[in-house]
């Protein structure tokens, strides 16, 4: 299977006067439709790496290619377009817009990319709400939902634009173990059903082992890279 | 449209804050509307009482003016001229029994001069002269000489002649100088007294914009080929004019400062909302929202607040003016200051609110482009 993401010689250094290097010469590639996990202790640079892959942050050196195109020469607007089109994000702190209902949050990526909200869009949003098991609370304001429900809304939202890649940073970080289990099953199901590439950061080895591939970062370097597939 | 919807939802979700800021703008706008109507009304009533019932531009000659009807036609063609009338004025003496009083005989074209002097409204007893040899006399003189309607009095014009006239009515101009001196009659009677028909001594003009009287006077002069002497109220009342101008500029100052304080208020509140909503903006940016769209959210907020503030402010301002003109009355039951409510001015105040609210939101709009997604994600 072809690669959808390639990272070449990526360094990340924070600070101007006091320099802290977080990533050292990372080279990785991710296949299309694969389900990958990144583990590592806190401070190992895994979130920084994910943010660089997701074009939310820029590498100090090196390049990121998404579907063969380098992101380093893109301006802010082009990056925003790329994110809107190809990438979906799920964060640890779910980050829904509290001013909107669950289903409005799910449709938000369509509006954000100035696409028309057609009947198909609404149908798809409802399907996604079904998929994440939230049909009953879709008109609740985001704040009136439990953490697990909010995270599932965030997942549905990440899927709305039918992105090729979903990047998730500790998506179950502050959820109980039952809900964690449920959400991972959901992500795997989506991976199979929609052929979406997943890169998931987790600190939970049990969860990581369910992935096709485990990458462990240590002190900003790739320590272990095991592919089960 | 996307930005507008988000802006609307942001405003609705923090409704308390929104109401406060809208109230802030409304108070500013209402002060503008009220002060503007007050000063406008004050200025209007001052102008009205001072020059409303007088000739604002006057054409005179060293000698009598003969072809006055042609001149009237000519003057009427000048832009800004509203009313043209003629008068034949002669200083003279009023003789009643043994008393003599200095007076000014004013022969007016009673029909044309009605637009200037509104004599019908000023008559307190009797009526307008309906035939020759009837006169109107001022209230002060009438009472001083203990006259009554129908009395015959003798007008003596030095070097010209004299004539017995009948009092047909009494006027009150509320100006004792006029009430003590003007004896008003029709043009023909005045012409008979001086013994020459078909002459007048002055042509009296009112203009549509009193503050342009000096320019209009110049245009009239040009139209009449500079054959006559032309005076206007502005040249004769410099002090009044500068008083009016000072009033106008002080009201402008008040309005400018009110606008500035409204702008500062909006800018500071919206600057806080950017920080409040930075998380949401960060998420939207991660979803592919561009900086321009994000800043449009805050511009839309400013615009919406401006519209709501303008509507509230105009309503509040009109309410204030209504309350003021209903309850602030002088002993006669008239408003202390007759307020001038101008649709144009009110629309302008509203527009200023919308524009300044939108301008004020430029600050937070700019700030929103600097929100970094990474900062938002890191700080949970």
Image (cartoon, coloured by chain):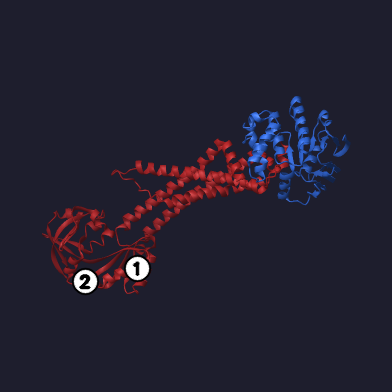
Chain colours: A blue, B red
Residue A115 coordinates in the image, percent (x, y): 65, 45
State the image quarter where residue A200 is shown: top right
Which residue, given by chain and number where applicable, does mark 1 sit on? B77
Q: Residue at x 54, y 43 (%)?
A: B305
x then y, percent, for residue B81: 34, 64
Mark 2–mark 1 CB contact (< 8 Å): no
Question: Which subunit holds the residue at mark 1?
Answer: B
Q: Is B80 positioned to the left or the right of B176 in the image?
A: right
**Callout 2: chain:** B
Name the spot of residue A28 as percent of width and height, x first. Answer: 85, 42
- Tell me the crowding category of disc 1: few under 14, some 14 to 19, or many 20 or more residues within 10 angstroms, Cα based: few
| Quadrant of the rendering where the C terminus of chain A is positioned | top right
Which mark is drawn over residue B127? none
Q: Could you say which is closer to the camera, residue A137 or residue B278? A: A137
Q: Which residue is mark 2?
A: B198
Crowd rating for badge 2 (residues with CA inside 10 Å; few <14, some 14–19, many 20+): some
């Amino acid at each position: 299977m072809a690669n959808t993401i390639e990272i070449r010689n990526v360094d990340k250094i924070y600070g101007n006067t006091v320099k802290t290097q977080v990533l050292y010469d990372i080279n990785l590639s991710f296949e299309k439709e694969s389900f990958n996990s990144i583990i590592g202790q806190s401070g190992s640079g895994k979130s920084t790496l994910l943010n660089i892959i997701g074009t939310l942050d820029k590498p100090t050196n090196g390049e990121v290619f998404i579907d063969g195109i380098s992101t380093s020469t893109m301006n802010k607007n082009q990056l925003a377009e790329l994110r809107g089109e190809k990438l979906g994000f799920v964060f640890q702190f779910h980050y829904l817009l509290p001013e909107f209902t669950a289903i409005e949050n799910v449709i938000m990526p369509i509006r954000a990319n100035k696409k028309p909200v057609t009947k198909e869009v609404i149908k798809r949003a409802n399907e996604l709400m079904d998929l994440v098991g939230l049909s009953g609370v879709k008109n609740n304001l985001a704040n009136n939902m439990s953490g697990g429900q909010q995270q599932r809304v965030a997942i549905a939202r990440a899927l709305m634009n039918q992105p090729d890649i979903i990047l998730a940073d500790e998506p179950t970080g502050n959820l109980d173990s039952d809900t964690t289990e449920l959400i991972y099953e959901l992500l795997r199901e989506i991976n199979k059903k929609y052929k979406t590439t997943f890169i998931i950061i987790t600190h939970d080895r049990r969860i990581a082992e369910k992935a096709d591939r485990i990458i462990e970062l240590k002190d900003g370097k790739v320590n272990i890279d095991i592919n089960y597939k | 449209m996307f930005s507008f919807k988000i802006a609307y939802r942001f405003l609705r979700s923090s409704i308390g804050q929104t109401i406060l800021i809208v109230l802030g703008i409304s108070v500013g706008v209402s002060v503008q509307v009220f002060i503007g109507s007050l000063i406008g009304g004050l200025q209007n009533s001052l102008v009205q009482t001072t020059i409303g019932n007088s000739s604002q531009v006057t054409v005179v000659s060293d000698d009598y003016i003969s072809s006055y009807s042609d001149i009237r036609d000519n003057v009427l063609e000048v832009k800004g001229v509203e009313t043209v009338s003629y008068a034949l004025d002669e200083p003279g003496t009023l003789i009643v029994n043994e008393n003599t009083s200095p007076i000014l005989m004013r022969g007016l074209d009673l029909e044309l001069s009605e637009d200037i002097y509104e004599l019908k409204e000023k008559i307190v007893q009797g009526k307008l002269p309906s035939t020759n040899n009837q006169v109107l006399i001022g209230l002060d003189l009438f009472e001083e000489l203990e006259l009554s309607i129908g009395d015959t009095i003798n007008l003596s014009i030095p070097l010209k002649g004299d004539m017995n006239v009948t009092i047909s009515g009494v006027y009150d101009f509320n100006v004792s100088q006029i009430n003590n001196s003007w004896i008003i009659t029709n043009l023909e009677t005045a012409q008979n007294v001086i013994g020459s028909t078909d002459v007048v001594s002055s042509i009296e003009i009112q203009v549509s914009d009193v503050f342009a009287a000096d320019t209009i006077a110049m245009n009239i002069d040009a139209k009449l080929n500079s054959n006559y002497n032309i005076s206007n109220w502005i040249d004769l009342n410099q002090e009044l004019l500068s008083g009016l101008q000072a009033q106008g500029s002080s009201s402008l100052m008040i309005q400018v400062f009110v606008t500035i304080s409204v702008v500062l208020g909006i800018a500071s509140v919206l600057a806080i909302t950017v920080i409040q909503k930075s998380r949401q903006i960060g998420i939207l940016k991660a979803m592919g929202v561009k900086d321009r769209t994000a800043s449009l959210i805050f511009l839309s907020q400013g615009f919406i607040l401006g519209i709501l503030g303008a509507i509230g402010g105009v309503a509040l301002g009109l309410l204030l003016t209504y309350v003021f003109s209903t309850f602030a009355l002088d002993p006669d039951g008239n408003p202390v200051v007759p307020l001038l409510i101008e649709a144009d001015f009110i629309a302008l105040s509203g527009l200023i609110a919308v524009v300044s609210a939108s301008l004020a939101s430029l600050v937070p709009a700019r700030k929103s482009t600097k929100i970094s997604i990474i900062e938002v994600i890191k700080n949970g």
